[in-house]
Image (cartoon, grey):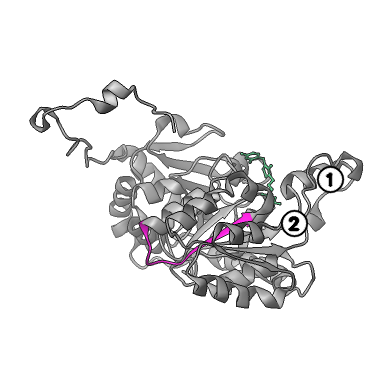
Amino acid sequence: MPPEFPTDVLGAEVEEEEVTFPTNYRTTARVQGDPTLVKKAVDLLLGAERPVVIAGSGVWWSRAEKELQELIELIKLPLILAQMARGAIPEDHPLCFGPTRVGTTQADVVLLVGTRLNYGLNYGRPGLFSRDGKWVQVDIEPTEIGRNRPIDVGITGDAQAVLKQMIEEARDRCKGREELPWIEECREYVKGRQEALEVDLHSNSIPIHPARLCREIRDFIDRDAIIVMDGGDTTVWGAGILKGYEPGHWLDNGPTGSLGVGIPFAMAAKVARPDKQVILLHGDGSFGLNAMEFDTMVRHNIPVVCVICNDEAWGMVMHGQQAIGEDRVIGTKLGFRPYDKMVQALGGYGEAVEKPEDIRPALERAYASGLPACINARCISIARGARRRPRT
Ligand SMILES: Cc1ncc(C[n+]2csc(CCOP(=O)(O)OP(=O)(O)O)c2C)c(N)n1
């Protein structure tokens, strides 16, 4: 590998006492929110009939999980989690609705904490979010506030610090506060969505339905497994079916959808937390981008288990093409590549899976192997909600 620094710099010798090592070079100060705006935000939340909180990765970076939980329990607010905030609050908490965009079309007050209105939240697109609702946004980066839509109360500040301020402001005003009927409506909505998914979760179809694949993974992995996802439709299925229960245990393509991050992320997660199960759910197209990093994992003995939802396509893009017309499918069919054999050849564990009942035994064998492993599952190519998509 060519040096990235001039060799004379790399080879230079210095006396240790001449060096200032980087200790205490970061402040522990947290940016507090403007108290007037904090009060306004709490007034809005306490006066709301249909409030919703959407929390994103900023909650993780600021380690604000405890405060987030305290606030939603105090005011009794339904919570939606996006990206790295998945698992910030266990997703079986009665006020936590995971990634389901519950109630956003009817909400009269929306509190955004540490998240952009990025593509994961459809940029706050009208129609998906209520038009007349009041919006409160808390973000450490002032230019993010109001970027994609007008904000009624914009609070620049650290998520943990501002949530603490909101808790202090709300505490005495919440004595005897009961749950709004709205929360039950949210629960009913999520129940309905889950029921609609039941058939797919238990599908026996061959090739395998992605929902069945995700359910098998969900039922198999430990509650504190680190979940990594990379792909298009695959990650939409995975995000809706897998659940986060621990802060900082969820890594995906992030706000720009950058494919190829899966193996590097999973590898880093396993190195950081060797005691944990790391599961990587991958699309087949995106797997190809950094697949050779399996060699790195073999050489350094990093036993990540990767399951490929192999729909033989750049699925999400292909489905977009198909929505215009079958004749518009260009360059997105990939065929079934034996990635399992590739991983085997590199010294890892590899297995192809064709039938849904073989997924769980394959997961057991992959984890038991103690090797970096690839389960290459042949799946049907289907977008979540495809039945509702317009066809022309
Ligand atoms: C680096 C990068 N290139 C291109 C895209 C555009 N893109 C979004 S989804 C997708 C298809 C992904 O296919 P695959 O990984 O097989 O997952 P699937 O959609 O089939 O589940 C593409 C190409 C992207 N998000 N990132």
Task: Indicate left or right for 189 with 368 as reference.
Answer: right
Q: Nearer the viewer, residue 34 or 298?
A: 298
Separation of residues labelled 2 and 1 (CA atoms): 17 Å
- The answer to whether 139 is drawn above or below residue 65 in the figure is above
Label 1: which secondary element? helix
Task: Indicate left or right for 72 with 29 as reference.
Answer: right
Disc with the residue nearer the chain's start (2 vs 1): 2
Magenta residue span: 272-282
Q: Nearer the viewer, residue 319 or 140?
A: 319
- The answer to whether 327 is drawn above or below residue 364 in the figure is above
At 58% from the left edge and 68% from the top edge, which residue is drawn?
187
Pick the quarter of the image with the C terminus. Answer: top right
Residue 311 x, y percent position in the rendering? 75, 56
Query: Does the numbered disc 1 mark a residue whose Cβ is under 8 Å from ligand 1?
Result: no
- Amino acid type, label 2: Asp
Residue 143 x, y percent position in the rendering? 44, 29
**Nearest-to-viewer mark from 2 and 1:** 2
Pick the quarter of the image with the N terminus. Answer: top left
Q: Which mark is residue 311?
A: 2
Can the viewer see residue 48? Answer: no
Residue 203 x, y percent position in the rendering? 75, 73
Query: Does the numbered disc 2 mark a residue whose Cβ is under 8 Å from ligand 1?
Result: yes
Q: Nearer the viewer, residue 98 or 380?
A: 380
Q: Residue furthest left?
A: 17
Q: Which mark is residue 231?
A: none
Q: Quadrant of ligand 1?
A: top right
Residue with the mark numbered 1: 323
